[in-house]
Amino acid sequence: MSENFNQTFGVNPPIIPSIDNTISPGHEVNKEDQNRNDYREEGIADNTNLSHRYRAMLHVKNSDKWKTAIGSAMALYDSLGQKSIHLIFVVTDEAVKTLIDKEKSNTDIVDSLKASLAHNSDDLATDILGLYNSGSEFIVCAHSLTEYNIDAEKLFSFVSTVPHGAVELVSKQNSGYAYLVF
């Protein structure tokens, strides 16, 4: 295969320095190689401007995927360390129903029913609260709330809203958050 490559181009491919700045033997180091990180924002290469080493965004859009999303979040905390990772749950579509606080929904029979149906068990609400207490953020798409006729005031108090979940997803990905979808 390398013969075909060399025949196609007539020369050996150039040697490219690796990500960690090591250079292949025989490759001269020049100023361009040494300064190729100059195009990155200051501090990104060594994470000095980040409060957490790792950042992940868990997009939950199906209520039946909450257990999997929570399990993944707990695995991330266990494997990487709670203080090393920042987790954000971005909740859209029908999964927003799960964040209705049963205590707040008791004043409205429809909201109470939505909350009861969304919470398969009290364990789910307990797990969500536990993740919040561990430092996770929960963001809900206001457009999804409107679509499912849910008043934002009926959600758990620690949940924040954004106008559109899609915009939040793109914004966080561009800020360096890993994207996990459930």
Image (cartoon, rainbow, N blue to C red):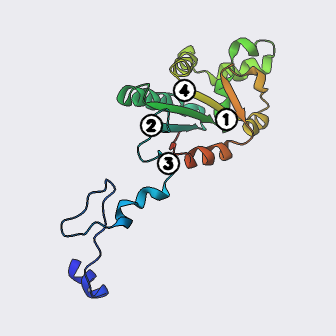
Q: In the image, is 91 to the left or to the right of 40?
A: right
Secondary element type, mark 4: loop
Residue shown at 76%/12% (left/top)?
106
**Mark 2 and 4 residues: CB-CB less than 8 Å, in contact?**
no
Query: Of label 1 and label 4, which has the lower sequence position?
Result: 1
Instruction: Report which residue position mark 1 lands on.
Output: 94
Question: Of circles 1 and 2, which is in front?
Answer: 2
Image x and y of residue 65, in percent:
53, 33
Secondary element type, mark 1: helix
User: Which numbered dot is residue 42?
Assistant: 3
User: Which numbered dot is residue 136?
Assistant: 4
| Structural distance between the alpha carbons of marks 4 and 3 | 26 Å
Question: Of circles 3 and 1, which is in front?
Answer: 3
Instruction: Report which residue position mark 2 lands on.
Output: 54
Secondary element type, mark 3: loop
Query: Of label 3 and label 1, which has the lower sequence position?
Result: 3
Image x and y of residue 58, in percent:
53, 37
Tell me if mark 4 has few (under 14), some (14-19) or many (20+) residues whose alpha carbon lies within 10 angstroms of its own: many
| Structural distance between the alpha carbons of marks 3 and 2 | 17 Å
Query: Of label 1 and label 2, which has the lower sequence position?
Result: 2
Query: Of label 2 and label 4, which has the lower sequence position?
Result: 2
Image x and y of residue 127, in percent:
52, 19
Tell me if mark 2 has few (under 14), some (14-19) or many (20+) residues whose alpha carbon lies within 10 angstroms of its own: some
